[in-house]
Amino acid sequence: MGKWSGFVMLAMVVILGAIYWMPAQAKEEKPVAAKLLRALEESGAAGETIQVRARTAMGLVESPDEVKRLAERWAKQLEIPFSHVEISRKHQMIVYQSETQKEGVQLRYEVSAVSKNGSFDTYVVLHLTGSPQTLLYMEEMQETFAKALKKANFIPQISTCIRGMYNDKMSVDQQEGRILSIFRTLEATELERLQDETVVSISGHTRMWEPFIALNGQKMNLQVATHRDSDAEKTWITVGTPIITVEY
């Protein structure tokens, strides 16, 4: 019961964060994955996967054909292969999606449109998934995308998550200690924590980068969560900014 309720509460934090996302300034965001990875590894964990998600609101268009043209145009501008295949049209929503892999990095390009009073609210989303070995290339890709969007006066909302692993089945107290060591490395202050028998999640704020979400009237741009594996002698850790947007 405690474990399940903990996961539910943690999921609610993610949902609320997604709703109240507030970039601090309308400016291009520099990649922060290297700082997160360094802090995670200094806590004793081995980095496993890196995920970067960039979401950009593109405004209103008037028809499904315009949604398709927008998807084609931005795929061309971002130099992403695009199949022109619409993968979904239901519940007042249209989605185009394309996946490709380069230099060990998985890229998913997605354009979604939500019906709104006869028009369509449109969004371009880029998902990058790689490893510590592909970090430099991922940062190059992120900056290339951000510059292309900025040139057209769009500022993407970027979330970064890094997952790692400790070769030890840690108690809640040990998990808390590792999380707080990451907070010290990133000079972060704690705002909120949730935990149960196997999971610990602590949210906070660091001055090392700007974008944030609003949490009870305060700025939040860091979340670190640990999860003791019930089947193996290991403990998983995920570090995210401004929140964790992947399963942990």
Image: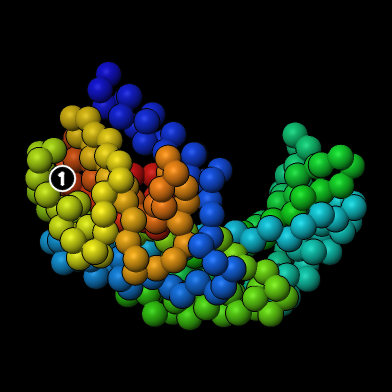
Crowding at dot 1, Cα within 10 Å, few <14 / some 14-19 / many 20+, comes out as many
Residue positioned 22% across, 57% down in the render: 183
Query: Taking 20 as reference, is 24 above or below it?
Result: below
**145 with respect to 51 (left or right):** right
Name the quarter where the C terminus is drawn.
Answer: top left
Q: Is residue 115 left or right of residue 144?
A: right
Question: Relative to 236, does residue 130 appear above or below in the rendering?
Answer: below
Residue assigned mark 1: 176
Q: Residue at x 59, y 65 (%)?
A: 156
Q: Amino acid at mark 1?
A: Glu
Q: How many marks?
A: 1
* Helix, strand or loop status at disc 1: helix
Q: Looking at this view, name the residue that lies furthest to the top.
A: 1
Q: Is residue 67 above or below residue 106?
A: above
The N terminus, quarter of image: top left
Can you name the residue that lies furthest to the front here?
217
> Looking at the picture, does residue 7 appear above or below residue 191?
above
The answer to whether 127 appears left or right of 87 in the picture is: left
Give the residue at x 82% y 54%. 60
Q: Is residue 129 visible?
A: no
Residue 161 or residue 213, whichever sits in front = 213
Residue at (70% x, 73% y) in the render: 153
Viewer can see residue 215: yes
Q: Position of residue 213 (x, y in %)?
A: 47, 51
How is the protein colored in the picture? rainbow
Q: Position of residue 16 (x, y in %)?
A: 49, 39
Front residue of 245/102: it is: 245
Indicate left or right for 197 with 88 as reference.
left
Residue 20 vs residue 39, the one in the foreground: 20
x, y (%) of residue 87?
A: 71, 49
Q: Quadrant of residue 33?
A: bottom left
Q: Picture coordinates of residue 34 (x, y %)? A: 33, 73
